Amino acid sequence: MSARTSRGPERGRFPEHIVEFARVLRRAGLPVGPGAVVDAVKAVEALGIRRRDDFYWALHAVLVTKREHDPVFGEAFRLFWRRRHGFEHVLEAMLPTAPEEQKPRSAQRRVEEAMRAGGREPHEWRRQEVEIDMTGTMSDLEVLARKDFAQMTAEEIAAARRAIETIAFSADEVRRRRLVAQSRGRRIDVRRTLRASMRSGGAIIDLKRRAPGWRRPPIVALLDISGSMSEYSRVCLHFLHALTEARGNVSTFLFGTRLTNVTRALKRRDPDDALAACAGTAQDWSGGTRIASALSEFNKLWSRRVLSQGAIVLLITDGLERDAGERLAFEIDRLHRSCRRLIWLNPLLRYDGFEAKAKGILEMLPHVDELRPVHNLESLQSLAAALAHDRPRAQIDPRRWLRPAA
């Protein structure tokens, strides 16, 4: 009886812990408002919880509104209410036992950052590691933006991924051939004008006009996931996920020894879930490279499906092909003729003394419109800004690499 009475103060503070838990969810990206927090407290009080599962699903029913929020909620529940980190006394106030429940950990990084931002992290839960202070001077941000992905630590890679999510993608729009309704168009839409005049009995004729519309061209990304690209492919996947979130009409394919379509996987809103789905779909991570075979399969099966309406192709590879020859030149030329722009992103351009000596690179250079580096944050930001421009600059013209050295 005395033990039961000692838990009274914790029972009285139980709504405060639910409010703090809702704040963690909000910082992790879930749309949790004040009304949902009040409903969560009422649901817990009215349910009469006797098991941990009941407590979990009571909060889940009120605070989760979309299916893609399940991993984030599950990871936040596991970290916030787990026994060994100082929160067990909250559940013990209402539950007989509070065993730790294993949930999907795809959103663990987002939840940990949200709990750190709130200042509620227990002392024993904090990692004894060197953390990067990204709130310092501008020189720290510039060093991170110019640092090679291959030379970054795990903490710096995580900071780079967070920076990729904040890249502002410019609006790339091209004029459509089809005319659309527009109040100030130069051409008169006779059909719509007659229909509008019939509504008023022909007494009033309101001229309806048309003009060429604008649309965003689709983007198709072909990402090399072979062993030589392993240090850059995962960061590029984060960039493509952010690009998909910003534009919507992005198709992504992975290739090493085979071609894999991961467009549907990258459409998941949570970046950790998206990359986990890509890793489960592609079976040839860090393997060999067969660029010619992958391009041949893409041109045969996917070219007419995704390369329409002036698509832009991003070819992300180092060009180190094992079977370089006339077949590679033929397939890259066919891909170039099927799209509006073919941009080759090569991490080997990070070297100042880069020269086009490999046979695969020499076969591909004459058939691309732009050659850009893709080894740090600065190069990704430059690519995001250049997607809205059709004319490449002189320093990214691939023909300059084909000229003989003086």
Image (cartoon, rainbow, N blue to C red):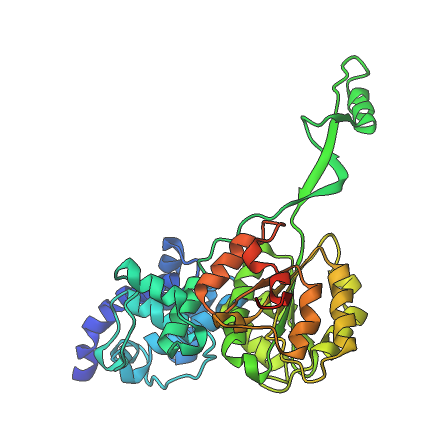
In the image, residue 66 above or below residue 287:
above
- Occupied quadrant, residue 312: bottom right
In the displayed structure, does residue 274 sit left or right of residue 299? left
In the image, residue 61 above or below residue 93:
above
Question: Residue 280: x percent and y percent?
Answer: 60, 81
- Report whether residue 283 is seen: yes
Question: Residue 34: x percent and y percent?
Answer: 36, 54
In the displayed structure, does residue 364 sit left or right of residue 152? right
Q: Nearer the viewer, residue 389 or 285?
A: 389
Quarter of the rendering occupied by the C terminus: bottom right
- Occupied quadrant, residue 155: bottom left
Question: Residue 290: x percent and y percent?
Answer: 69, 81
Residue at 81% of width from left, 71% of height from top?
300
In the displayed structure, does residue 352 sit left or right of residue 262? left
Residue at 45% of width from left, 79% of height from top?
105
Residue at 79% of width from left, 24% of height from top?
193
In the image, residue 301 above or below residue 279:
above
In the image, residue 309 above or below residue 194:
below
Q: Nearer the viewer, residue 72 or 256?
A: 256
- Report whether residue 46 is seen: no
Quarter of the rendering occupied by the N terminus: bottom left
- Occupied quadrant, residue 344: bottom right
